[in-house]
Amino acid sequence: MNFYSQLIQKIDEKKANIGVVGMGYVGLPLAVEMVKSGFTVCGIDLSEDKINQLKKGHSYIQDVSHEEMEEVISSNRFLPTTDYEAVKELDAISICVPTPLSENQDPDTSYITGVINSIKPHMKKGTLITLESTTYPGTTEELILNEFTKMGYEAGKDFFLCYSPERVDPGNEKYNTQNMPKVIGGTTEKCTELGVKLYSHYVGNVVPVSSPKVAEMSKLLENTFRSINIAFVNEIAMMCERMDIDVWEVIDAAATKPFGFMKFQPGPGIGGHCIPLDPMYLSWKAKGYRFYSKFIDLAQSINNNMPDVVVSKTSQVLNLDGKSINRANILILGMAYKPNVADLRESPGLYLYELYKENGANVQYLDPHAQSFIDDSGDVVHSVPYIEDQLKQYDCMVLVTNHGDFDYDQLANLGVPIVDTRNAFKDYDQQHIHKLGTSSKVFDRQDSVAL
Ligand code: SAJ
């Protein structure tokens, strides 16, 4: 019996031993779903701490509850380990490791390469490898297929290779690993068939495509689409500032169109582990084909300039009271990259913090979720406590992340000037509240202090 038929049979009988490399916000939920569907799963990670926590049934991932972890551990079918020796027992391996950007904004695929180098000495023939990390078209062939071909393996015969982009949205109550449609593309038809058969056990809707490149490109299209549309609505916001039109009212009006329009909202910039990075993977790879994506680079420059736009607006707002940013007491409300999470990765609030400091402000921040961060000078910066009387001392508060647990009523009624970058104060039509995308010039205000 050939490796393909053997693996088909093992998957059908749920006797295939599966490995997931990378026990993060993608890999751990995936491993949990695999165990729940009846497979024996080896969770591999370099972090001793993560593995020790998993062995004790502790979850450090928001979307995996302690109860789920305990259920998985007590099944005796989840084996967390740091030891790649475990690979030799595996029939299928899903790779879910980070794909960050390097210092000069180029793709950093060193985590993928590191995993492949660790797998190669132990992997048995007939194994199915599926890469899930978001990456540029061609990665699966260049960094994985070529490595095993050099060892004399033939894809679709001696081993099987797929790409299936992760679509995990941490904290999303509606979509999870099990019900999120999953695109998968194999190097050969047999590879795709095996990938579809295996993933169909723990993902409700598996979408086969003709190659890893199509699957790689589809993920980058999804997130580049977001980056470009966010940049476009940020540009509309700046246009509305200039034209003295309320951009938020404009967007709400446009969003009444039931087709042909998708609502995006202006903001202080883009953060997170996906949107700031994924488009750069695509534009970088395209340049290798002498294709220069104007949309991607323009979107990146507009979005990355939004913190500077917010600083300029803050300056206008302080100016209304005859003040400047220099020596002003400024409080950033919300530092995380999106509401109700503690995740600070690429958060625009972090850039804003540094810009205010550079402009001489005494800047602090308040975030009930993100308790502290390390600033550019290496100092630990802690969130200030939520003490109403102390909030009155600020010359300006800048709402960067509209966490659900802020008391907007109380904040609005402090009377402290507010720069609102998220329309979080949409229900408060007070002169001291200045929304991004509306005018804050002196001549537009009735109450400005005429010096
Ligand atoms: N943002 C705006 N305006 C918008 C939407 C987002 O300024 O209209 C900002 C956010 O404040 C944030 C950044 O962009 O700083 C990214 O926001 P996001 O809503 O895209 O959230 P992410 O980074 O968690 O993106 C993830 C992605 N999921 C995956 O890559 C698997 C993305 O594809 C999802 O569409 C997104 O979650 C989602 O919709 O929640």
Image (cartoon, grey):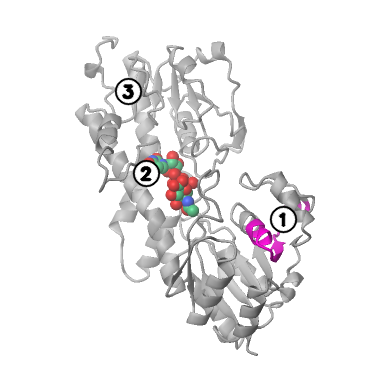
124 versus 269 height, above or below:
below
Real-space Cα separation, disc 3 to disc 2, in angstroms: 20 Å
**Residue at the location (47% across, 24% down)?**
361
Does the rendering let one see residue 51? no
Amino acid type at image mark 1? Ser
Q: Which mark is residue 312?
A: none
Residue visible at 57% across and 70% down in the picture = 130
User: Tag 1 or tag 3, which sits nearer the N-term?
Assistant: 1
Residue 389 rendering spot, x and y as whole percentages:
55, 10
Q: Nearer the viewer, mark 3 or mark 1?
A: 1
Mark 2 and mark 1: Cα distance apart in space = 34 Å
Asked if residue 426 can be seen in this view, the reply is yes
Front of the two marks 3 and 2 = 2
Question: 439 or 340: nearer the eye?
Answer: 340
Check mark 2 vs ligand 1: CB closer than 8 Å? yes or no. Answer: yes
Inspect the image, locate mark 3, and give the three-letter code of the amino acid beneath it.
Answer: Gln
The N terminus - image quarter: bottom right
Question: Where residue 161 appears, x then y in whole percent?
Answer: 55, 76
First to last magenta residue range = 31-52
Classify 10 Å Cα crowding around label 3: few (below 14), some (14-19), many (20 and above): many
- Pick the residue in front: 375 or 372: 372
Residue under the point 34% across and 15% down: 430
Q: Which residue is mark 3?
A: 316
What residue did someone put label 1 on?
A: 47
Furthest residue toward front: 13
What percent of the width, then of the height, locates residue 207? 45, 66
**Picture layout, residue 97 above or below residue 423:** below
Q: Amino acid at mark 2?
A: Asn
